Image (cartoon, grey):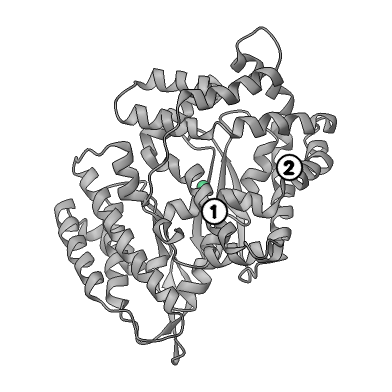
Amino acid sequence: MKTSLIAVALCAGGTSWMMAQQAPDPYRQISEAYVRLVLAVGQHDADYVDAYYGPDRLRTEAATDKLPLPDIATRAAALETEVARTALPSTKDDADLWRLRKQYFERQVSALRARVAMLQGKRLTFDEESRALYDAVAPRHSESEFSAVLAKLDAALPGSAPLITRYEAFKQAFVVPRDRLDRVFQTAIRTCRDRTMQYIDLPPGESFTVEYVTGKSWSGYNWYQGNYRSLIQVNTDLPIYIDRAIDLACHEGYPGHHVYNALLEKHLVRDRGWIEFTVYPLFSPQSLIAEGTANYGIEVAFSRADRAAYERDVLFPLANLSPDRAKEYYEVMALVDQLSYAGNEAARRYLDGQIDAKAAVDWLEKYAMMPRARAEQRVKFFDQYRSYVINYNLGKDLVRTFVERRTKSDGSPRRRWTEFAALLSSPRLPSGLK
Ligand SMILES: [Zn+2]
């Protein structure tokens, strides 16, 4: 839309930010009602609101009103109807973006209703839940598929001890010493940022802080604060291996969560005044895009060979690890990566009540090559975040397919980055990837 721009200054979290609002916006009321509802659900579910940097008054109102769940459910149903009957603007400019915005409201509100129903006690199977919350269902994989990969690992790690024991012993040589952790991470972050900035215009002043924490069910977390800033937390409960540096720098930072959030803030919130993007409900389809792009972003920033060479030449020496073993390490890790869907199988069986927590740990140890302590941490993650697990691997595969389809005629890095950045700057959801 090329209508006149009205600059509105709002106060959020004590800092003033400028929001250029385009008028008229047929979804303005819907957008505010949506933010209110997400914040209202956050009063009942501590994990629900992953980020919020919109007007303070809405946050205060949500806390004061403490809307009961049945009232939230009623309002959400009404909002869904309102979205359905609100026509798209007749503008020809950005028609695609408006269509995505409408779909965004439809799917996000529907997921909110599902989460509220769950908070009210409704039981869903793993697949029903992931469809309702994340707009996607993970494929099923059998033990025999994982066994084929395990046979290759068995050959790569010779010995008579159980495979998981040999794998743990092998990985010992690749732990980043605690006193070198920050240096390694900061270097990886700088590299990922440089690579991202070659292709993506990052908003001025964007930055993030890294903190090291313990006692969490996750291994890393990006808390987006608004104003193009993130707080990234790294969990040091368990040993951190050298491959985590690039994974974490790309996934949480560049071109992952930090860039995704900053681009949404820049292009949708500030440039257009679409305040629905100032709030991020964790249990919603947006998470599949967030996790999928964060994981696929690692491949966008580094080809496999490129990454292996960079780690060998830069990160291994920084972590005081022997660069001679880098190649061997990444060959083994590439095999372990093929077991990622075993984690979804464990979660599905566990959350569907077919196996208990101990059996889930056993399954993860056997088929996903997770050492005991890591597997136990993962089951705690299942308890807290449930079918959210599919967002990482299925999300990555769906995003990869989407970007590859759009770069068929030109597979150059620039074209791939351009398509990837367009996805990061848009309200596209899983069903919109098809
Ligand atoms: Zn993530």
Q: Residues within 10 Å of mark 1 (few under 14, many from 20)?
A: few
132 w.r.t. 378: above or below: below
Question: Can the viewer see residue 222 in this picture?
Answer: no
Q: Is residue 123 left or right of residue 101?
A: left
Pinpoint residue 394: horizontal percent, then vertical percent: 48, 45
Q: Residues within 10 Å of mark 2 (few under 14, many from 20)?
A: many
Pinpoint residue 397: horizontal percent, then vertical percent: 53, 47
325 w.r.t. 54: above or below: above
Q: Is residue 140 left or right of residue 297?
A: left
Q: Which residue lies most toward the front here? A: 409
Residue that appears at 77% across and 47% down:
306
State which quarter of the image contains the N terminus.
bottom left
| Number of callouts | 2
Residue that label 2 marks: 184
Q: Could you tell me the amino acid type at mark 1?
A: Thr
Q: Quadrant of residue 415?
A: bottom right
Q: Quadrant of residue 390?
A: top left
Pinpoint residue 233: horizontal percent, then vertical percent: 55, 45
Secondary structure category for the residue under label 2: helix
State which quarter of the image contains the C terminus.
bottom left
Q: Which residue lies most toward the top here? A: 160
Question: Can the viewer see residue 2 in this picture?
Answer: yes
The label on residue 53 is none
Q: Could you tell me the amino acid type at mark 2?
A: Val
Residue that label 1 marks: 401
Residue that appears at 32% across and 79% down:
88
Which residue occupies the foreground of this view, 150 or 132?
150
